[in-house]
């Protein structure tokens, strides 16, 4: 059974761009491997080992991205005023406010404000409306947030 990946149209474009860049690196890596082979004994050749390891990392990432793109399900923004996949949510607790975009796990990047719908915060927010209070359980304890806008 194939897994379906829920991503935004923007996330799909970013993955396509990354895939193109990674495929462009293949030639450089092949050159590094060929150059390292010229150094002689491969059993004690650190440059060769490093180039082969880089090749493995790049090829693995290419395969991952191709799988995601082949099984991608583009998500549409949910109902207006209700938190769903693709929603941009503004939360308030005390005097602090935070803005998050709820995305699928493939695109999640908390440092960029993109949280997964499968994360504790994302799960707590799903289906909430403006004005509702959400209690989010984190490792630091429970925090209460008000949904300011969706």
Image (cartoon, rainbow, N blue to C red):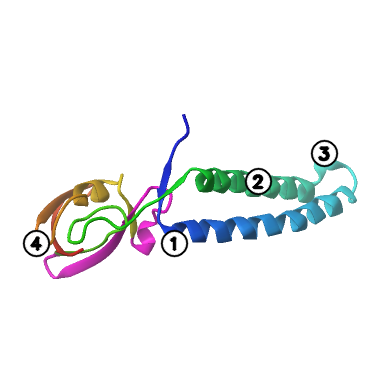
- Mark 1 or mark 2, earlier in chain: 1
Per the rendered image, the range of residues in magenta is 93-113
Residue shown at 77% from the left, 51% from the top: 47
In the picture, the disc for residue 43 is 3
Reading the image, the residue beneath label 4 is 131
Reading the image, the residue beneath label 2 is 59
Q: Is residue 118 above or below residue 113?
A: above
* Nearer the camera: disc 3 or disc 1: 1
In the picture, the disc for residue 10 is 1
Q: How far apart in space, not on screen, are marks 3 and 2 (Cα)?
A: 23 Å
Relative placement, left or right, of 144 versus 22 is: left
SS category of the residue bearing label 3: helix
Residue shown at 20% from the left, 52% from the top: 125
Q: How far apart in space, not on screen, are marks 2 and 4 (Cα)?
A: 47 Å
* Nearer the camera: disc 2 or disc 4: 4
- Mark 4 or mark 1, earlier in chain: 1
Relative placement, left or right, of 62 versus 118 is: right
Residue 137 seen in the figure: no
């Amino acid at each position: 059974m194939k897994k379906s990946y829920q991503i935004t149209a923007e996330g799909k474009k970013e993955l396509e761009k990354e895939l193109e860049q990674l495929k462009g690196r293949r030639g450089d890596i092949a050159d590094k491997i060929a150059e390292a082979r010229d150094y002689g004994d491969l059993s004690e050749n650190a440059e060769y080992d490093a180039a082969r390891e880089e090749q493995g990392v790049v090829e693995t990432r290419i395969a991952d991205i191709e799988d995601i793109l082949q099984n991608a399900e583009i998500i549409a923004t949910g109902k207006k005023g209700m938190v769903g996949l693709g929603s941009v949510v503004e939360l308030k607790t005390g005097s602090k406010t935070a803005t998050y975009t709820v995305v699928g796990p493939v695109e999640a990047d908390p440092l960029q404000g993109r949280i997964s719908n499968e994360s504790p915060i994302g799960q707590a927010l799903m289906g909430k409306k403006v004005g509702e209070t959400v209690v989010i359980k984190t490792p630091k304890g429970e925090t209460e947030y008000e949904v300011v806008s969706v």
